[in-house]
Image (cartoon, helix red, strand yellow):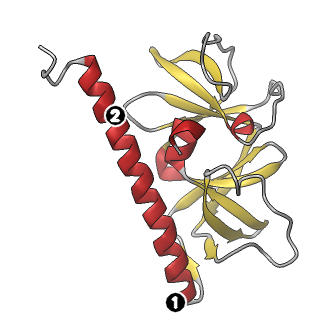
């Protein structure tokens, strides 16, 4: 009965296939945004974006991918999980896996008690652990390349960055949601 759609092996293969396709689409979207930015001069991204702080820097995450933001709760460790998986907790009656954004960026630290969990929309409940969620930015401007005189951002080499956006507080990386939720092994 291995060809039934409810078979766990088929479900896992399908999940990996969907994750790969989503990653490809996001990469294409990044490329198209860059091309459009060079053609249009100033390109404003539609919608709202959360400003997240993690690993000593700030980034933007599309608000339409977020279900809720909650304070950090006690996490149960997952033995054998990759280092960027901080643990699990029960969210509204369902188990949730917590991805530590700072660890994805190569920063190991114990999160403060006032850290936040950004609960992301999706078939599985995944929360992103960040130092804090600061505010919402409406229609940030997509910029091409790093700002003049700026140092390399820790996001550059991780595959987490979909582009750079100019906000009232300065230039911020825009996170690729699928890369954050899946982790480095799928990027």
As drawn, is 109 to the left or to the right of 120? right
In front: 182, or 56? 182
Vertical placement of residue 119 versus 140, above or below = above
Along the viewing direction, whichever of 6 and 41 lies nearer the viewer: 6
Graded by Cα atoms within 10 Å as few (under 14), some (14 to 19) or many (20 or more), the crowding at tag 2 reads: few
Task: Work out which quarter of the rendered image holds the N terminus and state it.
Answer: top left
Horizontal and vertical percent position of residue 107: 81, 37
**Residue 68 appears in the figure:** no
Q: Secondary structure at mark 2?
A: helix
Q: Quadrant of residue 94?
A: top left
Q: Position of residue 4 (x, y in %)?
A: 13, 21
User: Residue, x 80% and y 27% (percent of image)?
Assistant: 111
| 2 and 1 marks in contact (CB < 8 Å) | no
Q: Secondary structure at mark 1?
A: helix
> Label 1: few (<14), some or many (≥20) within 10 Å?
few
Discs 2/1, front: 2
Q: Is residue 170 above or below residue 68?
A: below
Precedes in sequence: disc 2 or disc 1 = 2
The answer to whether residue 100 is above or below residue 86 is below
Marking on residue 175: none
Residue at mark 2 = 15
Please tell me which residue is depicted at 83% across the width and 24% down the height of the picture: 110
Res 168 quadrant in image: bottom right
Residue wearing tag 1: 39
Q: Position of residue 63 (x, y in %)?
A: 53, 51
Is residue 39 visible in the rendered image? The answer is: yes
Of 145 and 165, the residue lying toward us:
145
- Tell me the residue at 52%/89% (across/down): 39
Query: In the picture provided, is 26 more to the left or to the right than 174?
Result: left
The Cα atoms of the two marked residues, 2 and 1, are separated by 36 Å
Q: Residue at x 77, y 52 (%)?
A: 154
Q: Is residue 114 left or right of residue 71?
A: right
């Amino acid at each position: 009965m291995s060809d039934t759609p409810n078979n766990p092996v088929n479900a896992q293969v399908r999940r990996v296939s969907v994750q790969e396709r989503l990653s490809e689409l996001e990469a294409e979207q990044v490329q198209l945004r860059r091309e459009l930015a060079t053609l249009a001069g100033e390109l404003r991204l539609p919608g709202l974006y959360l400003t997240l702080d993690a690993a000593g820097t700030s980034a933007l995450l599309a608000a339409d991918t977020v279900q809720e933001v909650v304070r950090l709760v006690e996490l149960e460790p997952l033995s054998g999980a990759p280092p960027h998986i901080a643990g699990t907790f029960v969210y509204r009656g369902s188990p949730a896996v917590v991805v530590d954004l700072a660890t994805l960026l190569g920063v190991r630290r114990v999160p403060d008690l006032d850290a936040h969990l950004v609960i992301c929309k999706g078939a599985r409940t995944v929360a992103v652990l960040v130092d804090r969620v600061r505010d919402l930015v409406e229609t940030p401007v997509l910029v091409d390349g790093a700002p003049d005189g700026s140092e390399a951002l820790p996001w550059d080499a991780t595959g987490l960055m979909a582009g750079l956006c100019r906000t009232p507080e300065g230039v911020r990386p825009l996170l690729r949601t699928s890369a954050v939720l899946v982790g480095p092994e799928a990027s």
